Amino acid sequence: MLAKEITQCIEDMLNAACNGRISLEMQIRAYDLLDHILDVDCSGVAGPAEAFREQYYHLETELKAAFDEEALKEEARKMMAPYINELDKAAENARKASALHEAAKQTFELWNNGGFFERNKALRNLRKMAGFRLESSRIGNFVAKTFDLMNEANMKCAQAQQALFNANVSYKIKPGLYSKIASALSC
């Protein structure tokens, strides 16, 4: 497995030297390889390690010129855009569900303790907010239902946050990864 990763990074170095650009995918593979090398004993991959070091020292100048941190960060931002949009939608739905639940609680409280006009006004506002006709005898049930809806919306929002967190690879954009890999493979 490690030998295959090293071979892939050798190909990436050659492509970067030819194209004059390190892509985000190449950068991620290099970061993951370095992370993997630092976690395991690399003595079993002497051949690929030697080939990597040889290619790196041959292409060192081209690789330094091919690294464009701003372009890589922009590419990472574009990759995360759908996740950010999904999180924004989920957060908005969570806010709406929370507001509906709070309105249902207030309406229930007014229904039990308020005057006739106050109760009817609160019920009209809640119906308008809910978007459907709500029977006055079911306000207590509606409070419980909106609580469930609020929890479900919050759960979807948390899932969207986690998906965004998992998609964020900007921390893998570091200069000099190939140099660090070559040094780490000198074990």
Image (cartoon, rainbow, N blue to C red):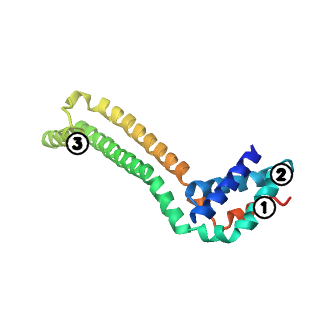
Residue beneath the point at 18% across and 41% down: 128
> Which residue is identified by label 2?
47
**What is the spatial separation of the Cα atoms under label 2 and label 1, in whole angstroms?**
10 Å
Residue type at the position of mark 2: Gly
Could you tell whether 35 is left or right of 15 in the image? right
Label disc, if present, on residue 53 of the rendered structure? 1
Q: 26 or 142, which is in the foreground?
A: 26
Q: Earlier in the sequence, mark 2 or mark 1?
A: 2
Whichever of callouts 3 and 1 sits on the residue coming sooner in the sequence is 1
Give the residue type at disc 1: Arg
Q: Gap in Å between the C-alphas at discs 3 and 2?
A: 68 Å
Question: Callout 3: helix, strand or loop?
Answer: helix
Say which residue appears at 62% left-offset and 58% top-offset: 15
Q: Quadrant of residue 53?
A: bottom right
The residue that disc 3 covers is: 129
At x 72%, y 56%, the residue is 34
Quadrant of res 138: top left
Q: Distance from label 3 to label 1 (Cα)?
A: 65 Å
Please indicate whether residue 59 sits to the left or right of residue 104 in the image: right
When the figure is inspected, residue 123 is found, relative to residue 138, above or below; the finding is below
Query: Percent from the top left, x then y, of residue 87?
Result: 42, 49
Query: 48 or 25, which is in the foreground?
Result: 48
The image shows residue 40 at horizontal and vertical percentages of 80, 49
Q: Quadrant of residue 30?
A: bottom right
Q: Nearer the viewer, mark 3 or mark 2?
A: 2
